[in-house]
Image: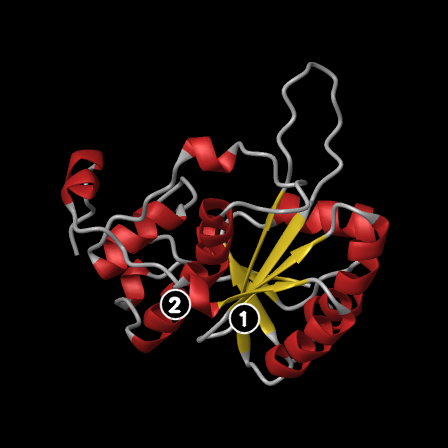
Amino acid sequence: MVEPSVVDIDELPAYEGIRLADVRIVRSPLDAAAALAALSQADVIGFDTESKPTFSKGEVSTGPHLVQLASDDLAYLFQIGSAASAQTALEVLKPLLESDSILKVGFGLGDDLKRLRSKLGIEARNVLDLATAMRRRGERNTLGAKTAVARFFGKRLQKSRRITTTNWALPHLSEKQVLYAADDAHVALRLYRYWRANPPADDAIVPARRAS
């Protein structure tokens, strides 16, 4: 497969992400119980976090403020900007992210894992960072979700910097924020499923390392 250039990616048809109707924002203990019951049945879940950006020199991030988990059919968003919301989310996130039997996949997860450990005391296990796992042999740079979607799906994943740098600590997220965040976790899972179902040639494989 030929690596698409930046120009080629821009010319690809748009990737159709998850529908708003398939996103669940976990706010109540009842929502949390439903999310835990559903995600506990998964063998693999997509995973990502979002943090309110810092703009001032010396400003320390208090993120993550949002954690996203996705099954094949649904994406779940956990807001952890306040102590109350963080406690509700923790009852789901801790058992899932610390589970040895459920694989968590995403892109560029190093900082996400550190922040979750610092803020919530979560020691995530059985995590696969696709940014390195899906690289071709000889590639030095990590693989981003946008390049991966172009490479494996032949589609253009829209990654708006304007949305990326919005305030993820807001109690009520916009529809664009919700879809952007949900897609980050869901597309990682979709890419993982495709990658495992269509393994590259042996000489293109970089041995995957799981964080534990």
Coordinates of residue 29 in the picture (x, y in percent): 77, 71
Q: Is 138 in front, or is 77?
A: 77
User: Which dot marks residue 190?
Assistant: 2
Task: Answer few, some or many: residues within 10 Å of disc 2's Cα (few below 14, many 20 plus, some between 14 and 19).
Answer: some
Say which quadrant the C terminus sits in: bottom right
Q: Earlier in the sequence, mark 2 or mark 1?
A: 1
Coordinates of residue 127 in the picture (x, y in percent): 60, 63
Residue 207 in view: no
Q: Is 74 in front, or is 209?
A: 74
Label 2 and label 1: CA atoms lie apart by 10 Å
Total count of labels:
2
140 in relation to 207, above or below: above
Query: Residue at image x 45%, y 46%?
Result: 176
Q: How is the image coloured?
A: secondary structure
Residue 191 in view: yes
User: Which dot marks residue 45?
Assistant: 1
In the rendered structure, the answer to whether residue 183 lies left or right of residue 66 reads left
